[in-house]
């Protein structure tokens, strides 16, 4: 639960290592018997054993106190290399935890192509391949958008075709009605003409009788 010894720029002194986890102290505390451990390590140890792991003195949770500030400062000043993939930044131990949080979540621009990348992506990053992938992704998106539009256009065309058929049918119906009306009118005229003719002939007959 401490800091891995391999992260340190120079081999850390033995007095900075926790006997439980064998790593460099993380939040060190000291026991009544004077032994120092990571807070998390000794707390977990005491949940099952009531003895100091080093000298076997009987101890309990209340026998644990903070280490002197000066000791903490010595540990915190040790230089470590960030263990995150593709990083390699060197800093004092007390800056490591905060740095690692950002280190894995923050992106930074590639100095060549300015693509935003995680540090872990930097090692395998190839500008041309990366940009190609971006272009391919955009092309794919464009294809999808075009396909949707084409489908909508096809739908509208079909609607228009059906509207045209309806309009043609309506026009044909109207023409039929007009023809029928004209036909009826013509027939009426024919009847009227025949009547008139008969009347005229009747009149003529009457005149010749005189
Ligand atoms: Zn420890
Ligand atoms: Zn002890
Ligand atoms: Zn880092
Ligand atoms: Zn690049």
Image (cartoon, rainbow, N blue to C red):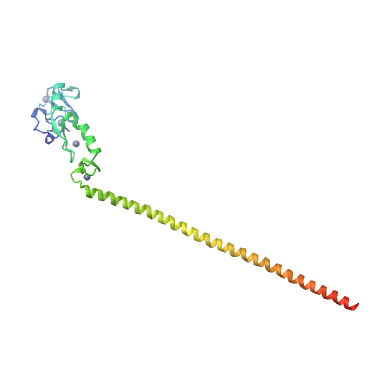
| Residue drawn at (34%, 52%) of the image | 142
Question: Residue at the spot x=90%, y=78% of the render?
Answer: 209
Q: Residue at x 82, y 73 (%)?
A: 200
Which x, y percent locates residue 96? 18, 32
Residue 184's image quarter? bottom right
In this view, the residue in front, 18 or 7, is: 7
Q: Tell me: residue 98, above or below residue 66.
A: below
Is residue 68 among what the camera can see?
A: no
Residue furthest out toward the bottom: 209
Report the quarter where the C terminus lies.
Answer: bottom right
- Comparing 31 with 17, the one in front is 17
Q: Is residue 163 visible?
A: yes
Q: Is residue 10 left or right of residue 203?
A: left
**9 left or right of 180 in image:** left
* Residue 12 on image: x %, y %: 9, 31
Q: Where's ligand 3: which quadrant?
A: top left
- Relative to 52, 193 lies left or right: right
Quadrant (top left/top right/bottom left/bottom right) for the N terminus: top left
Q: Residue 9, image x and y in percent? A: 11, 33
Along the line of sight, which residue is nearer the eye, 113 or 119? 113
Q: Is residue 31 above or below residue 3?
A: above
Query: Quick check: 139 above or below 12?
Result: below
- Position of residue 39 measured from the top left corner of the image (x, y, whole percent): 18, 28
Q: How many discs appear?
A: 0
Place residue 92 in its image quadrant.
top left
* Residue ID at (38%, 55%): 147
Depth check, front residue: 94 or 185: 185
Figure quadrant of residue 207: bottom right
The residue at the far right in this view is 210
């Amino acid at each position: 639960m401490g800091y891995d010894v391999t992260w340190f720029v120079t081999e850390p002194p033995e007095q900075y290592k926790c006997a439980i986890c064998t790593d460099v102290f993380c939040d060190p505390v000291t026991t009544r018997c004077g032994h120092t451990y990571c807070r998390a390590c000794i707390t977990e140890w005491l949940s099952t054993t009531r003895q100091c792991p080093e000298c076997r003195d009987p101890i309990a949770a209340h026998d644990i106190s903070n280490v002197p500030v000066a000791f903490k400062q010595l540990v915190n000043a040790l230089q470590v290399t960030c263990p995150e993939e593709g990083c390699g930044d060197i800093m004092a131990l007390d800056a490591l935890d905060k740095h690692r949080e950002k280190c894995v979540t923050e992106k930074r621009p590639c100095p060549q192509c300015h693509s935003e990348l995680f540090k872990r992506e930097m090692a395998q990053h190839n500008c041309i391949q990366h940009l190609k992938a971006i272009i391919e992704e955009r092309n794919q998106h464009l294809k999808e958008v075009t396909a949707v539009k084409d489908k909508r256009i096809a739908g509208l065309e079909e609607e228009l075709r059906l509207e045209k058929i309806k309009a043609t049918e309506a026009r044909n119906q109207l023409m039929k009605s007009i023809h029928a009306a004209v036909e009826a009118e013509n027939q009426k005229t024919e009847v009227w003409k025949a009547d008139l003719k008969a009347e005229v002939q009747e009149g003529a007959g009457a005149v010749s009788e005189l």
